[in-house]
Image (cartoon, grey):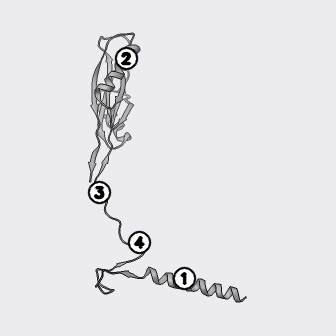
Amino acid sequence: MRITICFLTLVAGLSVSSGRASAQMACPQGVSPGSSQCLPTGGTVAPPARGPRWVLTWGAMAEDQKASIVGTSSGELSRRAAQRAAVKKCETMGGVGCKAVYSYKNTCAVIAEPIALLESMHGYYQNGPTVEEATRLVIPQCRSGNGGNECRVIYSNCTSPILKQ
């Protein structure tokens, strides 16, 4: 019984002393408590403001496969925004049933298609760290997918990060 009472007294004493600690003020040397220069202790000081940061941007392609119309977008802050902008551009160009088919973030992208008009031709999309690298990768894919016909890049663009304050 005696141990329990001592333990409760110790716990009560700790809670009282911890209550006093959170009400204390931290004052610079030579400043008396209560001054506006004093700050409360216990982590209630506001965190420092965030500095500028780089935000990655998105680009997208949307197409109307029946009409062979492709809309593009670049520099958007989200994938969804890039896709919506590409679909809207496709529709503005006369596309019906435009659908987002390709998106890329903070990189370069290209669209390649056969040089010759074919009865059934397919465009190819590719991204890479540079336009040159994306082109190097897409041309063989386009050629292979279009019966060996020569292909060319008809669109290229790069998205870059932006500095946000």
- SS under mark 3: loop
Quarter of the image with the C terminus in it = bottom left
Separation of marks 3 and 1 at Cα, in angstroms: 39 Å
Type of the residue with mark 2: Pro
Sequence-wise first label, 3 or 2 = 3
Q: Quadrant of residue 137?
A: top left
Please state the horizontal and vertical placement of residue 123, each as a whole percent of the image.
Answer: 36, 20
Separation of marks 2 and 1 at Cα, in angstroms: 74 Å
Q: Residue at x 29, y 81 (%)?
A: 36
Tell whether label 4 touches label 2 (CB within 8 Å): no
**Residue beneath disc 1:** 15
- SS under mark 2: helix
Sequence-wise first label, 4 or 1 = 1
Sequence-wise first label, 4 or 3 = 4
Tell whether label 1 touches label 3 (CB within 8 Å): no
Please state the horizontal and vertical placement of residue 84, each as a whole percent of the image.
Answer: 35, 38
**Residue beneath disc 4:** 43
Type of the residue with mark 1: Ser
Q: Nearer the viewer, residue 66 or 17?
A: 17
Type of the residue with mark 3: Gly
**Residue beneath disc 3:** 51
Type of the residue with mark 4: Gly
Is residue 17 in view? yes
Question: Going by the picture, which residue comes out furthest to the front?
Answer: 29
Separation of marks 3 and 2 at Cα, in angstroms: 44 Å
**Residue beneath disc 2:** 140
Position of 5 relative to 96 (above/below): below
Position of 154 relative to 26 (above/below): above
Separation of marks 4 and 1 at Cα, in angstroms: 18 Å
Crowdedness of circle 3 by 10 Å Cα count: few (<14), some, many (20+)?
few
Separation of marks 4 and 3 at Cα, in angstroms: 21 Å
